[in-house]
Image (spheres, helix red, strand yellow):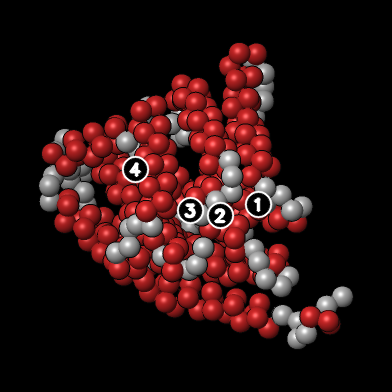
Amino acid sequence: MSLNRLSHIDGLRAIAALSVLVQHMFGDLLRSSAAGPGPLFSFASQSIDNIDLGRFGVVLFFLISGFVVPFSIRGDRPLKRFAISRLFRLYPALWVAIAALTVLYWSDGNTPSLTTITANLTMAPTLFGKTWLSSIYWTLFIELVFYFLAAALFATRLLFDFRAIFAFGLLLVASTVLSILARLHFSANIPVQYIGLHLSFLFCGLLLRLAIVEKVRYAGLAAIGLLCVQFASIAAISDFSLGRDDGFVIAGLQPVLGAYALAAVVFIAAVWSARPNFAFLSFIGQISYSIYLFHWIVCTLVYRVFPLTGQWSDLFVMGLCVLLTILVSWAVFVVVEKRMINFAKRLTAASKPLRPEMVI
């Protein structure tokens, strides 16, 4: 698929990023001590009770990554090029965000420890027994694990084998669901994690790419089959998640399952129709990573000046949050992201062999 034919993916990224932003602002409103039972407070509460826009955006991002990222492993020394491109695509902007978060916490008198900051810089703080400086960043570790898995599958020539990807997707779902069922029905003291289930949606995105774009026979059936298993699994584990308040299911089965289903429908429709293709959405999609990283920081600073009240006047505050988030994200994209992406391209181009016959 050509880059022009993938331009609508930026539109999907924009929808995902803005959905996450809206969900978090609604959550901020409901958690705000200053907010009363005003009309906007009630609207936000009803919205969250009916659909989890944050999860919708996250799943959309996962499907997009699975759809796009594996096909960036190409060219001379593909795994080296892939590692360099991902490193300079994701880490520099994250480091700027971590620095901004550190200053934000310092201004509140809650400066994080050096070990916590350092662990966050790796994009895998939980591996070092530390928490994220922003809980919003949990999806970054999922993406990081996906990159390693995609590289391993590429090295074993299985990355574009739809049968292997389908089987691997089922295995990932099972790694989450079976541990929960064992605890529920057999009182087994098995650790529960949702990483496998989350990762399965990235591989579902890959299956959808193989089916819709690459026209691999039966890949579509594999994608539909995996989606059905995923939806059934979410329904099966929802009560468990609610009971222990672990954050996977927050307000009930309906809003979270609806979010997953809507994300799948929107993604498939967009890829099939090569829509949306609006300039504004494409722009937002280009800076969506920085929107994801910086929107909570921007919103927190705005709330210090304009506290949320639960009234319709909060729409002005939220609009200001969106506008400033876009401006900050654009600045980070231009100053950091774009330069690092171009640097990675120059770095990988410089590493190419001069002549094929020189390769040993």
Q: Residue at x 62, y 34 (%)?
A: 170
Between the C-alphas of marks 1 and 4, the distance is 31 Å
Q: Amino acid at mark 3?
A: Ile
The first of marks 1 and 3 along the sequence is 3
Residue 104 showing in the rendered view: no
Residue 92 showing in the rendered view: yes
Task: Locate residue 290: give its quadrant.
Answer: bottom left
Q: Position of residue 52 (x, y in %)?
A: 35, 38
Q: Residue at x 63, y 25 (%)?
A: 178
Q: Position of residue 306 (x, y in %)?
A: 20, 56
Residue closest to the far bottom: 354
The first of marks 3 and 4 along the sequence is 4
- Residue marked by disc 2: 214
- Residue marked by disc 3: 64
> Is label 3 in contact with label 2 (beta carbons under 8 Å)?
no
Between the C-alphas of marks 1 and 3, the distance is 16 Å
The first of marks 2 and 1 along the sequence is 1
Residue 160: image tag: 1
Q: Which element carries disc 4, helix, strand or loop?
A: helix
Q: Which element carries disc 2, helix, strand or loop?
A: loop
Q: Which element carries disc 1, helix, strand or loop?
A: loop
Between the C-alphas of marks 3 and 4, the distance is 16 Å
The first of marks 1 and 4 along the sequence is 4
**Nearer the camera: disc 1 or disc 3:** 1
Label 3 neighbour load within 10 Å: few <14, some 14-19, many 20+: many
Q: Which residue occupies the foreground of this view, 226 or 181?
A: 226
The first of marks 3 and 2 along the sequence is 3
Between the C-alphas of marks 2 and 1, the distance is 10 Å
Residue 53: image tag: 4
Q: Amino acid at mark 4?
A: Leu
Label 1 neighbour load within 10 Å: few <14, some 14-19, many 20+: some
